[in-house]
C-alpha cells in the first residue's frame, strides 16, 4: 500500500503567539516554526505501517514557503521515502490545499492519505474531509486506531463521549487525533540519511489550481485579557468565595 | 434568505448544542429550518419543531443515515443547499466530520467554529487555540459554518414549526458504521462539563492523581482534566488532556491543581468563567489567569477542599 502524508509548517506549539500591532495577523518573524503536532502523528503512523509491512512507500507533501522543506526533511528523517514541496508564499486556505492534494493524489495514486485532524495555527479542521469529498473517497476522521482488513481499513474514531469504529473501502482519507501514537524523534543517522532523500519542487500553477483566497482577514486581535484575581489565604476562604460567587 | 441548521441528537433527544446553533443561525438572518437526520429522526423532529424561531423541520430517516456518516450526510445535504444561503452545524465531532465535506462539494471555504456573527459575510472565530481572534469576511455565495456552542445562548422552546419529510440517500457508501463504545460514566463529558477539576505534574503519580483529583471532581459533579505534563508523565489518560493539543474547555468553574500554567494549557481553559488555582509556587503563571489563587501544598489543601464542600 502506498501512503501520502501531507504536512504543514506552523508556529511551534510552545511559542506564545503575538498579534501584529496593525491587526493584520500573527507575527511570524523570528518565531520558532515546527511541524504541526498532528502531522507528526500522521507521519509516525505511516512509518509504523511501513515497519509492519502494510505500507511500501510513504510520500510526504507540503504546501508552503521554501522553509517548509525543513518540515518535509523532518518527515523524511522520521522514515518517509520522498517529498513534494508545493511552493508558495501566500496563505493557502484548506479548500485550496485540498484541491492541490487532490491533484497530487491523481498523480501519485496512493491507497491512503493520512493527515493531521487540524493545524494548530488556523484550527480549521477541514483539509482531510474536503480532500475526501473532492476525491469521492470515504473518510475516517479523528483516528484513534487504524487496522488494515483486506481491502478495507477499520478506523476507530475519537468522538464526543467515546469511540466509534467505521470500515472504509480503500482508497480512503484518514485524519489523526492525539492518542493514535507517540511520534518518534528522528535519530542523527536518520537525519543524515534524510538529506539524501528526494524532494520535488512544484508550484500551485503546475497543478492548475486556483488558490486565490475566499476569505479576507478583516482583523486579528488579542483575546480579551483575563485579569488576575486575588490570592486567598486558606481553603475555608476559598470555599466561602466560591459560594458567594455561586460557583459551588 | 434561508438557513439550514443540521440538528445534533442522541438517544432520541435533541442536544442542547442544536439550540445554540439556532441562535447563531438566527443572527445570520432569514428563515431558519432544522434538518433532523438519522436514527430516531421521527422522535426528535417534534422536539426540533418547538425550538424558537424555526420555520420548518426536515426529517430524514433511513438505514444509510443511521449514524450520520459524513458520506451519507454529504449526499443528503448538498442537494438541499439549492434552497439555502447557509448551513450551520455545531462544532462537535459530528459537525466537524460532516461540514467540510459539504463545503468542498459546494466549492465553498468553510468558516470553522465561529463565536460571533457580524453580518451575513463576516464572522469571528478563534485561531491558535483562542490565543488570537480573527474576523473574516467570506466572498462565497453560500456559507458553510460550524458553531462553537459556548459562544451562543440556547434558543427557547416556544416554536411551532411544520415538519416535512426529506428523502434519505440510497447507498451504498464507501464507509460503513461498525460499532461504537461510549464512555459510561456518571461524570460529565470533559468538553461539555459545567465544572472541571484538572491535575498537573505536581501530583507526582497516577495513584495520587486518582486519590486527590477524582474525589474532588465527584464531589462537585465535575469532569476530570489534566495538563499535558501530567498526561506525558502517565498520571492521567490522554483523553483527559486540556490544552492546545488536547481538549478546549470553557466551564463555569475550572479548578487547576498542581498545574503551573504553560501556554499550551492556558490555551485550553482560559475562557472558563471562574478559575481556581492551587499551587505551592506563588510565581506560577496559572495565578495570572486565576480568579482565586491558593498558594498551598496541594496534598494538604485538596483533601481539605473536598471535605469542606
Image: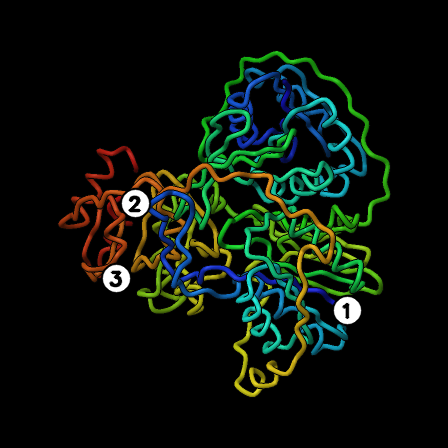
Element assignment for label 1:
strand
**Crowd class of label 2 (few under 14; some 14 to 19; many from 20; radius 10 Å):** many
Output the chain of dot 1: A
Identify which residue is drawn at 39% across, 51% down. Answer: B267
Which mark is in front, 2 or 3? 2
Identify which residue is drawn at 64% across, 50% down. Answer: A127
Task: State which quadrant residue B285 falls in.
Answer: bottom left
The residue wearing badge 2 is: B275
- Is residue B8 something one can see in this rendering? no
Identify which residue is drawn at 65% across, 45% down. Answer: B97
**Position in image of residue B175 (x %, y %):** 78, 49
- Left or right: A44 in relation to B76: left
Output the chain of dot 2: B
Marks 3 and 1 close (CB-CB < 8 Å)? no
Q: Nearer the viewer, residue A244 or B74?
A: B74
The residue wearing badge 3 is: B299
Q: Residue furthest front?
A: A205
Q: Nearer the viewer, residue B133 or B248?
A: B133
**Position in image of residue A179 (x %, y %):** 56, 62
Element assignment for label 2:
strand
Task: State which quadrant residue A111 falls in.
Answer: bottom right
CA gap, disc 2 and disc 3: 19 Å
Amino acid at each position: 500500500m502506498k501512503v501520502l502524508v501531507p504536512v504543514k509548517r506552523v508556529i511551534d506549539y510552545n511559542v506564545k503567539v503575538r498579534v501584529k500591532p496593525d491587526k493584520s495577523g500573527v507575527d511570524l518573524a523570528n518565531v520558532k516554526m515546527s511541524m504541526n503536532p498532528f502531522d507528526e502523528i500522521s507521519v509516525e503512523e505511516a512509518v509504523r505501517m511501513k515497519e509492519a509491512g502494510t505500507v511500501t512507500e510513504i510520500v510526504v507533501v507540503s504546501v508552503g514557503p521554501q522553509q517548509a522543506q525543513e518540515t518535509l526533511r523532518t518527515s523524511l528523517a522520521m522514515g518517509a521515502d520522498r517529498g513534494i514541496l508545493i511552493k508558495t508564499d501566500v496563505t493557502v486556505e484548506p479548500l485550496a490545499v485540498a484541491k492541490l492534494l487532490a491533484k497530487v493524489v491523481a498523480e501519485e495514486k496512493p491507497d491512503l492519505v493520512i493527515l493531521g485532524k487540524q493545524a494548530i495555527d488556523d484550527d480549521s479542521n477541514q483539509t482531510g474531509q474536503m480532500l475526501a469529498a473532492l476525491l469521492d473517497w470515504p473518510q475516517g476522521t479523528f483516528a484513534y486506531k487504524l487496522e488494515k482488513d483486506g481491502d478495507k481499513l477499520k478506523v476507530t474514531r475519537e468522538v464526543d463521549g467515546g469511540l466509534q469504529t467505521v470500515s472504509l473501502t480503500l482508497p480512503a482519507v484518514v485524519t489523526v487525533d492525539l492518542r493514535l501514537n507517540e511520534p518518534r524523534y528522528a535519530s542523527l543517522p536518520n537525519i543524515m540519511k534524510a538529506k539524501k532523500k528526494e524532494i520535488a519542487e512544484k508550484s500551485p500553477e503546475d497543478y492548475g489550481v486556483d488558490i486565490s483566497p475566499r476569505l479576507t482577514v478583516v482583523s486579528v486581535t488579542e483575546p480579551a485579557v483575563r485579569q488576575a484575581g486575588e490570592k486567598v489565604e486558606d481553603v475555608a476562604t476559598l470555599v466561602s468565595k466560591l459560594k458567594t460567587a455561586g460557583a459551588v | 434568505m434561508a438557513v439550514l441548521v443540521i440538528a445534533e441528537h442522541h438517544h432520541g433527544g435533541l442536544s442542547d448544542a442544536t439550540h445554540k446553533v439556532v441562535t447563531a443561525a438566527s443572527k445570520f438572518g432569514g428563515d431558519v429550518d432544522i434538518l433532523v437526520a438519522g436514527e430516531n429522526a421521527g422522535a426528535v423532529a417534534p422536539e426540533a419543531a418547538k425550538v424558537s424561531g424555526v420555520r420548518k423541520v426536515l426529517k430524514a430517516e433511513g438505514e444509510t443515515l443511521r449514524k450520520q456518516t459524513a458520506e451519507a450526510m454529504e449526499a443528503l445535504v448538498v442537494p438541499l443547499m439549492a434552497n439555502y444561503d447557509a448551513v450551520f452545524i455545531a462544532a462537535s465531532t459530528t459537525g466537524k466530520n460532516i461540514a467540510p465535506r459539504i463545503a468542498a462539494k459546494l466549492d465553498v471555504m468553510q468558516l470553522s467554529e465561529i463565536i460571533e456573527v457580524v453580518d451575513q459575510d463576516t464572522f469571528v472565530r478563534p485561531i491558535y487555540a483562542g490565543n488570537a481572534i480573527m474576523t473574516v469576511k467570506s466572498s462565497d455565495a453560500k456559507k458553510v459554518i460550524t458553531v462553537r456552542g459556548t459562544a451562543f445562548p440556547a434558543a427557547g422552546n416556544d416554536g411551532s414549526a411544520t415538519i416535512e419529510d426529506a428523502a434519505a440517500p440510497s447507498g451504498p457508501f464507501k464507509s460503513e458504521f461498525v460499532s461504537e463504545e461510549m464512555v459510561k460514566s456518571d461524570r460529565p463529558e470533559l468538553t461539555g462539563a459545567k465544572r472541571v477539576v484538572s491535575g498537573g505534574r505536581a501530583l507526582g503519580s497516577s495513584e495520587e492523581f486518582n486519590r486527590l483529583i477524582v474525589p474532588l471532581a465527584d464531589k462537585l459533579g465535575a469532569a476530570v482534566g489534566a495538563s499535558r505534563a501530567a498526561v506525558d508523565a502517565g498520571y492521567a489518560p490522554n483523553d483527559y488532556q486540556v490544552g492546545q493539543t488536547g481538549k478546549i474547555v470553557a466551564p463555569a468553574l475550572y479548578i487547576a491543581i498542581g498545574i503551573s500554567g504553560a501556554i499550551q494549557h492556558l490555551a485550553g481553559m482560559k475562557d472558563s468563567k471562574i478559575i481556581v488555582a492551587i499551587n505551592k509556587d506563588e510565581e506560577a503563571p496559572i495565578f495570572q489567569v486565576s480568579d482565586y489563587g491558593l498558594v498551598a501544598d496541594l496534598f494538604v489543601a485538596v483533601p481539605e477542599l473536598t471535605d469542606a464542600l
